């Protein structure tokens, strides 16, 4: 009786909404702590507090961190739910999302679990953003039809905020197609094709037709299609594959129709497309015509030249003290006196030859005269980085030809240090990095450069040792290993900084100035990259601590919101602070296979967003650090990263960063002046709809207007064009 009264009160209080095929509820009873007997329906929860399951528990006054709490819901499940359903086999309990993991019991029986709890064999693993759909057999799953059911949910919170959130708890009877989902794998390598997988999450029978079509987005014409009869069963996905032309800009659409109910599910995917024309077989110099070095520092410069191998490199008037390797075009040696040394380098292969007049600029402030290009381990491997992974990416950088476009820094991010320093206080490496010196030598032998990571604090963000109180020793270690790049990440320095009485700009500058002194004392050029997320307007003082670049924001991730916020919103106005040797750094690239772990996946940016990313980053004179596994890089990503005309904007020796020159509605225009008197212009559609744009509204028709991605001049009738949502046009005007 007591229970029935409670249920009635609950029904009126929270308003259960019952439609034809679902019952939904957002309020529950709530108790901190953990006791598995709370799963039992007979548990007396009358004294438990009331809570809203659609809002995190922090927002409702419960700060429960690294701990458990339970929710209990009393619910009448009406048998009328089954009536309208095309199959009456299962009932799905769609739970709110759980920050971080949950176990769900129906009348005492476990019906589903997402993520894993600290006590589990696999150890704690958050699954805070995963939707929870737990199917239960309508007859044998333990549902008490037309009576009181108790749904008890055990939640563990591994880090703020915590608890159930987002959607209410819904109980529904699904139709045949509801557990179906379509997944695409776009393989842009060799003969490009898209694999389409149809899976069925529920034990419901369905058979129907999958219809796939590919439309050319430029012409609107259908360029490919297939249909196939399929019957996906639970746990046994079925798939089809369709080839496509990677030089066309295409949209794939897949629709599955359940033949009995006529219910359909469909999904669209803009396919990857390559605009960059193939490089000629003849040699072509793809790098800036200059490189800077400090007097007395070792010179390591690999001439970035594409074209068929083998290739022979020679130099006319090569200054004394320098050597150019004939087979791979690596310039080495050292020059003791400041000044500009100009000479001509020629590359020759079976198909022809090409030359570049090149200047080696020797002087004290000559590091990073154009933005650094290379790779960093963080966006792909994060803390799972190892020497093996660095070497495999370096080898791929060479084999796949990225080094022929100027990518040369191979930077290890967080995760290389041992747990303790050596007894003499020098930094030690962990077992994943057998020898830093050997790794440095291996990279240098190939004309590549070696980058490393540390923090001015006690610990790095990943919990590894930082450089505090060992700055000089670390700078000396880096020199002895042959390090050419240091990313110095604030992280643990927050603790030291918290103790500062005066938290003015000087307190932010101090740790970076200290390392600058010791780095610059080393007899080699170490590109100094500050990473402190833009605090204290680092762009205003970065160059005065002789930093070669400084991160202007927090970390990027592979979603439009992140790239838009960092690239468009936060870089506007920063152009005046960039100059040769000193660059704003809007963070590393998020194209290719990324994942911040040992599990990599395709970047979640759409192909149009990836074109926008590279367009904007080259306009911004940003560091161009690839953040993916190069060994797994597909043709699309190579096309994005190896367009010599696009990269030439990034490497332009005038060193003027682009700024936003107009923003009308969703169309933003960014431009920068170039050393040859031309102007680079990016016209971006940052809105959610495709937009019709007339380029003549932004550029006089009297100029030569070059489409940089396609590497061709635009004719007057090509000026009126569509820019897709989050896409762009990249132009050079002269
Ligand atoms: C962050 C930094 C990232 C990465 C990470 C390593 O502070 O912004 O780029 O270096 O630390 O723990």
Image (tube, rainbow, N blue to C red):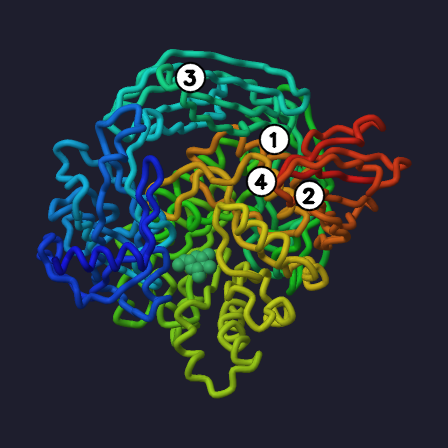
Mark 1 vs ligand 1: CB below 8 Å: no
Q: Quadrant of the N terminus?
A: bottom left
Q: Nearer the viewer, residue 381 or 387?
A: 381
Q: Is residue 120 left or right of residue 284?
A: left
Report the mark closest to the observer, 2 or 1: 2
Q: Is residue 77 left or right of residue 679?
A: left
User: Could you give the CA–CA distance between mark 3 and mark 4, rounded to whole angstroms?
Assistant: 28 Å
User: Could you give the CA–CA distance between mark 3 and mark 2, rounded to whole angstroms?
Assistant: 35 Å
Q: Which quarter of the rendered image does ligand 1 occupy?
A: bottom left
Q: Nearer the viewer, residue 226 or 188?
A: 226
Contact (CB < 8 A) between labels 4 and 1?
A: no
Q: Is residue 618 left or right of residue 445?
A: right
User: Could you give the CA–CA distance between mark 3 and mark 1, rounded to whole angstroms?
Assistant: 44 Å
Pointer 4: residues within 10 angstroms few (<14), some, or many (20+)? many
Q: Quadrant of the C terminus?
A: top right
Reading the image, the residue beneath label 2 is 684
Going from N to C along the chain, the mark reached first, 3 or 1, is 3
Mark 2 vs ligand 1: CB below 8 Å: no
Report the mark closest to the observer, 3 or 1: 3
Reading the image, the residue beneath label 4 is 609
Pinpoint residue 355: horizontal percent, then vertical percent. 71, 34
Reading the image, the residue beneath label 3 is 210
Residue at horizontal 38 percent and vertical 52 percent from the top: 166
Q: Nearer the viewer, residue 396 or 202?
A: 202
Q: Nearer the viewer, residue 656 or 612?
A: 612
Reading the image, the residue beneath label 1 is 306
| Farthest-out residue, right | 702
Report the mark closest to the observer, 4 or 1: 4
Element on which disc 2 rests:
strand
Contact (CB < 8 A) between labels 2 and 1?
A: no
User: Could you give the CA–CA distance between mark 2 and mark 4, rounded to whole angstroms?
Assistant: 10 Å
Going from N to C along the chain, the mark reached first, 4 or 1, is 1
């Amino acid at each position: 009786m007591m229970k029935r009264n409670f249920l009635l009160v609950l029904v009126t209080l929270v308003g259960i909404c019952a439609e034809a095929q679902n019952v939904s509820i957002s309020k529950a009873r709530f108790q901190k702590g953990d006791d598995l007997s709370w799963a039992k329906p007979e548990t007396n929860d009358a004294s438990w507090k009331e809570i809203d399951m659609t809002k995190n528990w922090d927002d409702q006054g419960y700060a429960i961190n690294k701990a458990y709490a339970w929710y209990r819901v009393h619910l009448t499940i009406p048998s009328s739910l089954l009536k309208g359903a095309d199959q009456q086999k299962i009932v799905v309990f769609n739970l709110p999302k759980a920050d971080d993991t949950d176990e769900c019991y129906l009348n005492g029986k476990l019906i589903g679990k997402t993520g894993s709890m600290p006590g589990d064999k696999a150890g704690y693993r958050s699954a805070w953003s995963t939707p929870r759909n737990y199917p239960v057999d309508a007859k044998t799953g333990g549902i008490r039809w037309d009576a009181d059911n108790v749904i008890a949910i055990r939640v563990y919170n591994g880090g703020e905020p915590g608890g159930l959130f987002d959607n209410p708890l819904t109980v529904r009877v699904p139709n045949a197609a509801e557990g179906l989902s379509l997944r695409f794998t776009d393989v842009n390598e060799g003969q490009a094709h898209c694999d389409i997988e149809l899976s069925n999450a529920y034990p419901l029978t369905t058979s129907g037709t999958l219809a796939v079509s590919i439309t050319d987005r430029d012409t609107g014409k259908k360029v490919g299609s297939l249909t196939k009869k399929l019957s996906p069963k639970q746990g046994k996905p079925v798939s089809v594959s369709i080839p496509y032309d990677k030089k066309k800009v295409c949209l794939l659409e897949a629709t599955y129709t359940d033949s009995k109910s006529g219910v359909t599910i469909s999904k669209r995917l803009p396919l990857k497309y390559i605009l960059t024309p193939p490089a000629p077989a003849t040699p072509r110099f793809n790098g800036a015509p200059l490189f800077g070095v400090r007097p007395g520092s070792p010179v390591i410069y690999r001439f970035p030249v594409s074209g068929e191998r083998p290739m022979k490199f020679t130099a006319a008037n090569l200054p004394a003290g320098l050597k150019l390797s004939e087979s791979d075009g690596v310039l080495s040696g050292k020059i003791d006196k400041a000044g500009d040394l100009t000479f001509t380098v020629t590359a020759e292969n079976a198909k022809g030859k090409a030359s570049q007049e090149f200047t080696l600029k020797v002087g004290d402030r000559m590091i990073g005269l154009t933005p650094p290009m290379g790779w960093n381990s963080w966006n792909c491997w994060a803390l799972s980085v190892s020497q093996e992974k660095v070497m495999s990416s370096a080898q791929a950088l060479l084999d796949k030809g990225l080094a022929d476009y100027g990518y040369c820094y191979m930077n290890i991010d967080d995760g290389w240090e041992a747990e303790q320093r050596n007894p003499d206080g020098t930094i030690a490496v962990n077992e994943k990095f057998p020898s830093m010196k050997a790794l440095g030598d291996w990279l240098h032998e190939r004309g590549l450069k070696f980058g490393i990571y540390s923090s001015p604090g006690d610990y790095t963000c990943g919990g590894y040792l930082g450089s505090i109180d060992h700055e000089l020793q670390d700078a000396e270690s880096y020199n002895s290993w042959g390090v050419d790049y240091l990313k110095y990440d604030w992280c643990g320095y927050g603790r030291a900084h918290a103790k500062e009485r005066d938290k003015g700009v000087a307190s932010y500058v101090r740790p970076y100035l200290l390392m600058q002194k010791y780095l610059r004392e080393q007899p080699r050029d170490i590109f100094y990259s500050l990473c402190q997320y833009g605090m204290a307007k680092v762009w205003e003082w970065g160059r005065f601590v002789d930093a070669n670049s400084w991160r202007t924001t927090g970390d990027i991730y592979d979603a439009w919101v992140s790239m838009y916020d960092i690239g468009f919103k936060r870089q506007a106005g920063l152009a005046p602070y960039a100059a040769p040797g000193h660059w704003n750094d809007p963070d590393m690239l998020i194209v290719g296979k990324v994942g911040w772990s040992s599990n990599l996946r395709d970047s979640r940016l759409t192909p149009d967003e990836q074109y926008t990313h590279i367009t904007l980053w080259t306009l911004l004179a940003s560091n161009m650090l690839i953040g993916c596994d190069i060994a797994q890089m597909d043709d699309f990503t190579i096309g994005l990263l190896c367009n010599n005309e696009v990269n030439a904007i990034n490497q332009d020796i005038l060193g003027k960063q682009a700024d936003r020159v107009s923003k009308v509605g969703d169309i933003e225009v960014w431009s920068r002046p170039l050393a040859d008197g031309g102007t680079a212009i990016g016209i971006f559609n940052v809105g959610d709809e495709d937009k019709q744009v007339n380029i003549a509204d932004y550029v006089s028709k009297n100029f030569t207007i070059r489409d940089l991605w396609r590497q061709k001049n635009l004719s007057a009738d090509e000026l009126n064009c569509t820019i897709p949502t989050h896409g762009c046009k990249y132009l050079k005007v002269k």
